[in-house]
Amino acid sequence: MKSNFLQRAITGIIFVAVLIGCIVGGAVSFGILFAIISALAINEFCNLVNHVEGIQVNKRICILSGIFLFLCFFYFGIDPSQTGIFIPYLALFIYLMVSELYLKKENPLNNWAYAMLSQMYIALPFALLNVLAFHSDETASISQYNAILPLSIFIFN
């Protein structure tokens, strides 16, 4: 019992150190860390959902869509004039919806619902961290990374 608690405590301390280090470390480390966390969280969600009888979510496409959504918001945070970056995400999402129809699964609408839930419940909140992380001034053409606001989300929670 003690070793399990100690192992979890050490893992938690390491995770918090990596989280704070990557947020403070700069925009690239912030983007890489949260893209990985988004992928792992969606993977875990899809594994849990796929254990339900009759549900078989396309895990690879959900993970790819979640990472791409985060990276779209990341790039949009850096350069807000590039709104066309979201078009490939929409194409990927439409592919996910159409592919469910042709996979001959028993409940394609439930699979759609859980796939959309993975995007809205997991990927979107991580993607919206980029809205807090990047701030633009009127004088600069690209935005500046500011670690204080994303860090405050984790400190105050």
Image (cartoon, grey):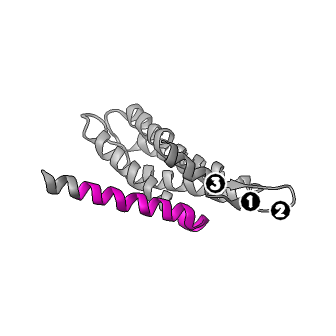
What kind of residue is marked 1? Ser
Front residue of this view, candidates 145 and 156 = 156
The residue carrying mark 3 is: 133
- The residues bearing labels 2 and 1 have C-alpha atoms spaced at a distance of 7 Å
Picture layout, residue 29 above or below residue 35: below
Q: Earlier in the sequence, mark 3 or mark 2?
A: 3
Residue at 73% over, 52% down: 83
Any mark on residue 26, and which?
none
Considering the numbered disc 1 on the image, is that residue within a helix, a strand or a loop?
Answer: loop
Q: Earlier in the sequence, mark 3 or mark 1?
A: 3
What kind of residue is marked 2? Ala
Q: Is there a contact, CB below 8 Å, between mark 2 and mark 1?
A: yes
- In the rendered image, residue 131, in percent from the top left (x then y), is placed at 65, 49
The residue carrying mark 2 is: 140
Within-10-Å neighbours for mark 1: few <14, some 14–19, many 20+:
some
Residue at 62% over, 54% down: 148
Residue at the far left: name it: 1
- The residues bearing labels 3 and 2 have C-alpha atoms spaced at a distance of 16 Å
The residue carrying mark 1 is: 143
What kind of residue is marked 3? Ala
Residue at the far right: name it: 139
Residue 44 within the segment the image draws in magenta: no
Q: Is residue 77 left or right of residue 56?
A: right
Q: Is residue 122 left or right of residue 70?
A: left
Is most of the magenta stretch helix, strand or loop?
Answer: helix
Residues drawn in magenta: 7-31
Considering the numbered disc 2 on the image, is that residue within a helix, a strand or a loop?
Answer: loop
Front residue of this view, candidates 131 and 124 = 131
Residue at 59% over, 66% down: 26
Within-10-Å neighbours for mark 2: few <14, some 14–19, many 20+:
few
